[in-house]
Image (tube, grey):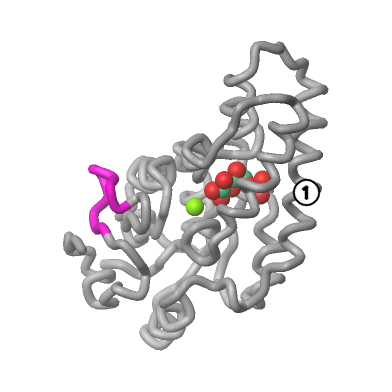
């Protein structure tokens, strides 16, 4: 029986894709590295340093660890500046209703995100105090597809992994949820994931009874 829902943050609660894209684009332009939206798609759910490695794989230059650290820091400074524009208006359709419905049914809710900017983003969109637990990029060693962030969220909630369903927009996140022994709902681009238990284009199409039974539905 499902007793908790773990939400990924970027791409599920709020769309930060464009800001990540703009920040990485500025860094790649400065470094003369080819970067486009298709490459940006591959960064979905991937940690900051691993995202940087994907971007640098399009360059001939060999970067030292300290150069990489500085580039990641520069990208994050640009990204955080852009995040200042985020507000509750950027919460994706269907999320608020879903959170209210889950609370009404006594289902626990948590965030499980690779992002180290999770506290800042939740603050910007006004949801900093709405979750029963938050596991994020600051509290884990191994990023998705490792199961660590979702197992930590379940531990914080005091529930077993098999009682959890994860909502994700990235293949790496669906893999992480399955590796944790949880049910996985793929939304947006993750609706194509072969191993998602349920596939949806959009949260606003979600039927909460289906979610809690995790029957396979496709839209
Ligand atoms: C994930 C995003 O949620 O967080 C990735 O989908 C991002 O694109 C990752 O790279 C790490 O984010 P941050 O905010 O710690 O740089
Ligand atoms: Mg995501």
Q: Locate residue 41, reporting x and y percent.
A: 48, 42
Q: Locate residue 148, reporting x and y percent.
A: 51, 43
- 194 falls in the magenta region: yes
Closer-to-camera residue (209/35): 35
Residue at 79% in and 57% down: 81
Closer-to-camera residue (130/196): 196
Say which quadrant the C terminus sits in: bottom left
Relative to 64, does residue 118 appear above or below in the rendering?
A: below
Relative to 92, does residue 9 appear above or below in the rendering?
A: above
Relative to 106, does residue 120 appear above or below in the rendering?
A: above
Res. 154 visible in picture: yes
| Residue at the bottom extreme of this rendering | 104
Question: In the rendered view, does 206 fall on the left or right side of 39?
Answer: left
Relative to 51, does residue 113 appear above or below in the rendering?
A: below
Asked whether mark 1 lies closer than 8 Å to ligand 1, one says no
- 52 falls in the magenta region: no
Mark 1 crowd level (few <14, some 14–19, many ≥20, 10 Å Cα): some
Question: In the rendered view, does 85 fall on the left or right side of 107?
Answer: right
Res. 139 visible in picture: no
How many marks on residues?
1
Residue at 77% in and 16% down: 64
Question: In the rendered view, does 126 fall on the left or right side of 164?
Answer: right
Residue at 71% in and 11% down: 62
Q: What element carries label 1?
A: helix
| Residue 130 figure quarter | bottom right
Say which quadrant the N terminus sits in: bottom left
Which span of residues is magenta-colored?
191-199
Mark 1 — residue?
Answer: 78
Q: Locate residue 201, reporting x and y percent.
A: 31, 62
Q: Locate residue 129, reporting x and y percent.
A: 65, 76
């Amino acid at each position: 029986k499902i007793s908790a829902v773990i939400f990924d943050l970027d791409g599920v609660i709020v769309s930060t894709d464009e800001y990540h894209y703009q920040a990485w684009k500025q860094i790649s332009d400065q470094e003369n590295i080819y970067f486009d939206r298709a490459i940006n798609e591959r960064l979905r759910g991937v940690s900051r340093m691993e995202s940087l490695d994907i971007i640098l794989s399009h360059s001939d230059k060999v970067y030292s660890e300290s150069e990489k650290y500085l580039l990641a820091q520069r990208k994050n400074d640009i990204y955080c500046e852009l995040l200042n524009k985020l507000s509750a208006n950027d919460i994706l359709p269907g999320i608020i209703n879903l959170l209210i419905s889950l609370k009404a049914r006594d289902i626990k809710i948590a965030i499980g995100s690779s992002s180290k900017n999770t506290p800042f983003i939740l603050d910007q969109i006004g949801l900093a105090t709405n979750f029963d637990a938050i596991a994020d990029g600051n509290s884990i060693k191994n990023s998705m597809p490792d199961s660590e962030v979702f197992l930590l969220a379940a531990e914080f909630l005091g529930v077993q992994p098999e009682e959890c369903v994860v909502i994700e927009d990235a293949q790496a996140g669906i893999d992480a949820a399955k590796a944790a022994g949880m049910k996985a709902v793929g939304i947006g681009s993750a609706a194509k994931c072969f191993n998602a238990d349920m596939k949806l284009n959009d949260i606003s199409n979600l039927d909460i009874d289906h979610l809690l039974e995790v029957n396979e539905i496709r839209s």
